[in-house]
Image (spheres, helix red, strand yellow):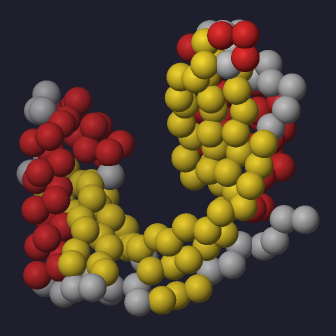
Amino acid sequence: MIQEIDKQQTDASITETIVILETQVDDMSAQAIAYTMEQLLQNGALDVYTQAVGMKKSRNGILITVICHCDHQSICEQILFRETSTLGIRHRLQERKILHREIHEVETEYGKARVKIARRDGLWTIQPEYEDCAKLARSHHVPLTRIQDIVRVAGERLLDMGKANL
């Protein structure tokens, strides 16, 4: 039986129980796998990734790995069975530790973008939101890395002004 998500605050980090789902396929197109990944992410998967694997009878295949919260296991399994050719899915519970984070919107010369800010042991992590940065880069014809740098600096200014609540 799958247990509810167990979250425990410790020193600005959270320990939680997640589910890892894995299946291997050897007869799907890259487009079908990409579509499956999109469906999984839209329906609660925290992350989805693929790896090339050698399967029985020396066939090349793809290992699809899904990370999700326990309460999304069923829907993610349904998507894997519906959208792939798999005949079975492995699952296991695993603990992970994640930093507590806040998402803030910052203003830049190119427009608004969100930034994730996390802290652990006196060290800060500032991570610009990719989608926001990519949108600004496209609309202003500026390199993505430039936008990300500008957004990161704006996040640092938030810290300097004491607006992050971490």
Residue 78 pos. (x, y %): 83, 38
Expressed as whole percent of the image width and height from the top left, the position of residue 146 reads 9, 42
* Horizontal relation, residue 149 to residue 18: left or right: left
Which of the 4 image quadrants contains residue 55? top right
Horizontal arrangement in the rendering, residue 88 relative to residue 16 (left or right): right
Q: Residue at x 23, y 30 (%)?
A: 138
Q: Residue at x 76, y 22 (%)?
A: 84
Q: The N terminus is located in which quarter? A: bottom right
Q: Is residue 25 left or right of residue 67?
A: right
Residue ID at (32%, 45%): 130
- Report whether 51 appears left or right of 137: right
Q: In the image, residue 113 lies at what x, y percent?
A: 27, 54
Residue sitting at 32 percent across and 52 percent down?
A: 129
User: Is 59 or 100 nearer to us in this picture?
Assistant: 59
Relative to 25, say whether 166 is above or below: below
Q: Residue furthest front?
A: 57
- Relative height, residue 133 to residue 142 (above, below): below
The answer to whether residue 28 is seen in the rendering is: no
Q: How many marks?
A: 0
Residue 74 x %, y % = 83, 49
Q: The C terminus is located in which quarter?
A: bottom left
Depth check, front residue: 36 or 164: 36
Q: Which quadrant of the structure image shows residue 104?
A: bottom left
